[in-house]
Image (spheres, helix red, strand yellow):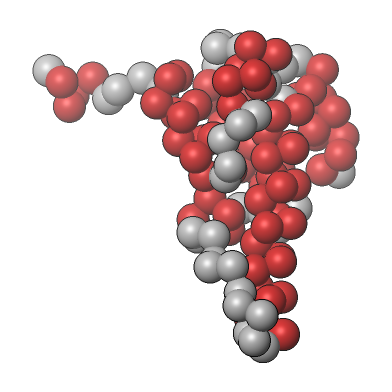
Amino acid sequence: MANSIIQLLASDKFNSEGYSNWKSNINTILVVDDLRFVLMEECPLVPSSTANQNVRDIYDRWVRANEKAQSDILACISDVLYKKHEVIPTTREIMASLQEIFEQPHPLLYA
């Protein structure tokens, strides 16, 4: 199911219209693929060479999930946005950047 959602989003790439709907779709993809935690958790520290296997596994899982989530997001945005965001190291930072660019401020906060 997730692949078909990504294909649908990739066929109609986000360029600046409908940010809220696009963000909701991305969050759905991340939940379905069990990747949403990379938006809420900082990257664990790189394990030392003496770290136990559990610590290495946690780090490796986060890195793999971050790479997959980044790929999903970058596949679903316009080429211009892709170029701007492909160098950003974490999914969390990509989403924060897109939110800063496209999310409209709440009108009551600035009235």
Q: Position of residue 76 (x, y in %)?
A: 72, 25
Residue that extends furthest to the front in the rendered view of this protein: 49
Please state if 104 lies on the left or on the right of 108 as rendered: right
Image point 80% across, 33% down: which residue?
6
Residue 69 sits in which quadrant? Answer: top right
Decide: is 102 above or below 40.
above
Q: Position of residue 100 (x, y in %)?
A: 39, 26
Q: Position of residue 55 (x, y in %)?
A: 63, 80
Please state if 55 lies on the left or on the right of 104 as rendered: right
**Is residue 100 visible in this depiction of the protein?**
yes
Image point 68% across, 76% down: which residue?
56
**Is residue 14 visible in this depiction of the protein?**
no
Foreground residue among 66 and 87: 87
Decide: is 3 above or below 51.
above
Residue that extends furthest to the left in the rendered view of this protein: 111
Q: Position of residue 44 (x, y in %)?
A: 54, 66
Q: In the rendered image, which quarter contains the C terminus?
A: top left
Residue 110 sits in which quadrant? Answer: top left
Image point 56% across, 11% down: which residue?
17
Please state if 29 lies on the left or on the right of 103 as rendered: right
- Total numbered labels: 0
Q: In the rendered image, which quarter contains the N terminus?
A: top right
Image point 52% across, 35% down: which residue?
95
Decide: is 67 above or below 52.
above
Decide: is 22 above or below 46.
above
